[in-house]
Amino acid sequence: MEKLKLLALSGSLRKASYNTAAIQALKILAPEHIEITIGDIETLPLFNPDREDEDLPSLRVLKKSLGDAAGLIIATPEYAHGISGPLKNALDWLVSGVEFPDKPIMLVNTSPRANHAQEALREVLSTMSGVVIEKACVSIPLLSTDFSCNEIVEDRIMADTLKVSLSEFCKAIKAQKLRD
Ligand SMILES: Cc1cc2nc3c(=O)[nH]c(=O)nc-3n(C[C@H](O)[C@H](O)[C@H](O)COP(=O)(O)O)c2cc1C
């Protein structure tokens, strides 16, 4: 069976990030026919429209992974009621590309109190013509747990929640493919 490729981005650059741990856990929990690539947004320069025609290796790799992916998974922290700077920076680099529009998107929220960033992110993603798959969006209460990726995988409730959401995401992607 051909693998369904997904790209996952974490909006946090922190080593012990809950958001990064959540997408690492998703990668481990994914069934064999789903291949999750974790993208790097840390090495992108600060967005500058004057540089959009430059060949930036980090942007080239990100665009290639996004172009190859049937869907995008995003997990981001909220900072001062906003989207994380690194994630917004990456999205700004992707605004004018051909890879983003109509891409199905799954959102992973690791802090159920972080509503402002999730709302702002949804607004940005819809402006960029991304398609947030509501049934696949998931909230898992990782804040203050000290959980790493392995502990998420071993926690039955969290692992099952992530697996169900991923399955909904894949169903929606397949349904969209059939419609196209
Ligand atoms: C500078 C700063 C500002 C923050 N602002 C908010 C906020 O407005 N709302 C919120 O729910 N959490 C806020 N937090 C908490 C982070 O979202 C939380 O620590 C989260 O786990 C960070 O994500 P990470 O674990 O993936 O690095 C803030 C944290 C920092 C360091």
Image: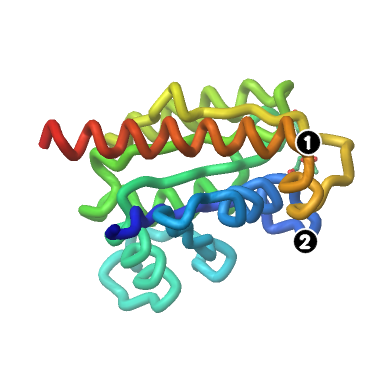
Quarter holding the N terminus is bottom left
Mark 2 Cα-neighbour bin, 10 Å: few <14, some 14–19, many ≥20: few
What residue is pinned by disc 2?
A: 15
Q: Residue 130: which quarter of the image?
A: top left
Quarter holding the C terminus is top left
Q: In the rendering, at what x and y percent does residue 99 appear? A: 26, 53
- Residue sitting at x 78%, y 36%: 142
Is residue 58 rendered to the left or right of residue 104?
A: right
Q: Residue 168: which quarter of the image?
A: top left
On screen, 52 above or below 167?
A: below
Circle number at residue 27: none
Q: In the rendering, at what x and y percent does residue 90 appear? A: 47, 54
Mark 1 Cβ inside 8 Å of ligand 1? yes
- Residue sitting at x 40%, y 78%: 57
- Residue sitting at x 34%, y 63%: 63
Q: Nearer the viewer, residue 165 or 54?
A: 165
Residue 128 seen by the camera: no
On screen, 133 above or below 38?
A: above
Q: Specify the amino acid type for callout 1.
A: Leu
What residue is pinned by disc 1?
A: 142
Q: Nearer the viewer, residue 158 or 16?
A: 158
Is residue 102 rendered to the left or right of residue 38?
A: left
Colour treatment of the image: rainbow
- Distance from the alpha carbon under mark 1 to that under mark 2: 15 Å
Q: Is mark 1 on a helix, strand or loop?
A: loop
Q: In the rendering, at what x and y percent does residue 153 appear? A: 72, 47
Q: What element carries label 2?
A: loop
Q: Specify the amino acid type for callout 2.
A: Lys
Residue 4 seen by the camera: yes
Of all residues, the one furthest to the left in this rendering is: 180
Q: Earlier in the sequence, mark 1 or mark 2?
A: 2
| Image quarter where ligand 1 lies | top right
